[in-house]
């Protein structure tokens, strides 16, 4: 089965890379854009499986380039959840910590 690749800049849909359908006997494909990704932004890679007979099968994956390492909002939300869970476990298991939290909450209620 042959595989075809295309990379487009989104949302414009401007093509920045295209590799015509070809067979890869090793089962591994390494794509190397000639000039790399031209500018930071969102991109979409279109992968098309082209069988010898039958219908083509398309898959699309988006990626962001040029922003360095960033933490996604979902990851940040997960970290916050884990931190609150750890504090809650500490609150339930440590009487001294529980007393301090209860005292702070009592003062907060006075406002």
Image (cartoon, grey):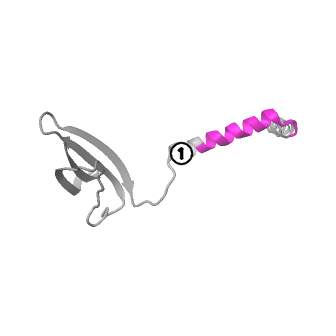
Q: Quadrant of residue 92?
A: top right
Q: Residue 100 at x, y = what percent?
A: 85, 40
50 or 41: nearer the eye? 50
Q: Residue 77 at x, y = what percent?
A: 57, 42
Residue at the image position 56 percent from the left and 46 percent from the top? 76
Quadrant of the frame with the C terminus: top right
105 or 54: nearer the eye? 54
Check if residue 91 falls in the magenta segment.
Answer: yes
Q: Residue 54 at x, y = what percent?
A: 13, 33
Task: Tell me: residue 67, above or below residue 47.
Answer: below
Work out whether residue 84 can be spotted: yes
Check if residue 5 falls in the magenta segment.
Answer: no
Horizontal side, residue 91 vs residue 64: left or right: right
4 or 37: nearer the eye? 4
Residue at the image position 68 percent from the left and 39 percent from the top? 84
Residue at the image position 25 percent from the left and 65 percent from the top? 34
Q: Secondary structure at mark 1?
A: helix
Read off the residue under disc 1: 75
Residue at the image position 13 percent from the left and 39 percent from the top? 52
Query: Magenta residues: mostly which secondary structure?
Result: helix
Horizontal side, residue 52 vs residue 17: left or right: left
Horizontal side, residue 68 vs residue 78: left or right: left
Q: Which residues are magenta?
A: 79-96
Q: Residue 28 at x, y = what percent?
A: 30, 50
């Amino acid at each position: 089965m042959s595989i075809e690749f295309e990379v487009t800049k989104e949302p414009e849909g401007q093509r920045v890379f295209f590799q015509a359908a070809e067979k890869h006997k090793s089962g591994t494909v390494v794509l190397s854009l000639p000039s790399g990704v031209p500018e930071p932004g969102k991109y979409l890679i279109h992968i098309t499986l082209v069988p010898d007979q039958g219908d083509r099968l398309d898959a699309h994956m988006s990626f962001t380039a040029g922003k360095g390492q960033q933490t996604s909002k979902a990851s940040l939300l997960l970290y916050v959840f884990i931190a609150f869970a750890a504090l809650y476990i500490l609150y339930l298991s440590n009487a001294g910590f529980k007393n301090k939290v209860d005292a702070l909450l009592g003062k907060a209620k006075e406002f």
